[in-house]
Amino acid sequence: MERKIDRFDKYMKYKGLNDNKVTVQLSLSVGLIGKSRQKGRDLSDAAIEKILNFYADLNRNWLLIGDGEMLNSGEDIATPTRNRGDDLADAYRTIIETQKQLIKSLERQIELLEDRLNDENRGGAGKAATMAG
C-alpha cells in the first residue's frame, strides 16, 4: 500500500524539490522526511498540515488517501507551477537588489560629505594660520 510519504515523494519529484529544500521551506526537523521513508513510518499529521498549507497546489485527498489527481483542480499537471517559496525568494532578491542600490547611494553621499569636510578643514587651517601671523 502506498504511504503518504510515497505520494509526497512523487510531488517533490514533479516540483523539482529535495528533502533539504522542503525541510527549510516548512521549518521541519532535519531528517524528518528521510525518517518518514523508513519501513513502518510515514509523515506525521503535523508535517502533513505544514505541507498542505505551504504547497497550495497539492491535492489534500490525493496526499492523504491517494484519491484524485496530485494537483488541485484547475492546475495543469503537465506544467509545473511556481510555489510560494519561489515567489518569496524572488521578493527577497528584489529587496537585496534595492538595498545594494541604497548602499551605493549612501556611500556616494558619504564620499561627498567627506570631501566637503576635508575642503572646509583645509580652508579653516589656512584661515587660522593667516590670523595667527
Image (tube, rainbow, N blue to C red):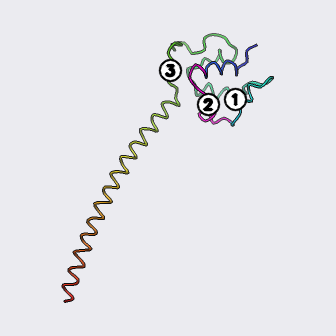
Query: Callout 1: few (<14), some (14-19), or many (20+) C-alpha neighbours within 10 Å?
Result: many
User: What element does badge 1 sit on?
Assistant: helix
Pick out the residue farthest to the right: 40
User: What element does badge 3 sit on?
Assistant: loop
Residue 90, given in percent of the width and then of the height, sits at 45, 34
The mark that comes first in sequence, 2 or 3, is 2
User: What element does badge 2 sit on?
Assistant: helix
Is residue 5 a member of the stretch shown in magenta? no
Residue named by callout 1: 33
Mark 1–mark 3 Cα distance, whole angstroms, equals 22 Å
Q: Amino acid at mark 3?
A: Thr
The dominant secondary structure in magenta is helix
Pick out the residue farthest to the top: 68
Compare residues 84 and 18 and report the one nearer the observer.
Answer: 18
Above or below, comparing residue 18 to residue 79 in the picture? below
Residue named by callout 3: 81
Q: Amino acid at mark 2?
A: Val
Compare residues 70 and 126 and report the one nearer the observer.
Answer: 126
Residue 115, given in percent of the width and then of the height, sits at 27, 64
Residue named by callout 2: 22
Tell me whether the residue at label 1 lies in contact with that at label 2, contact meaning CB atoms closer than 8 angstroms.
yes
Residue 22 position by quadrant? top right
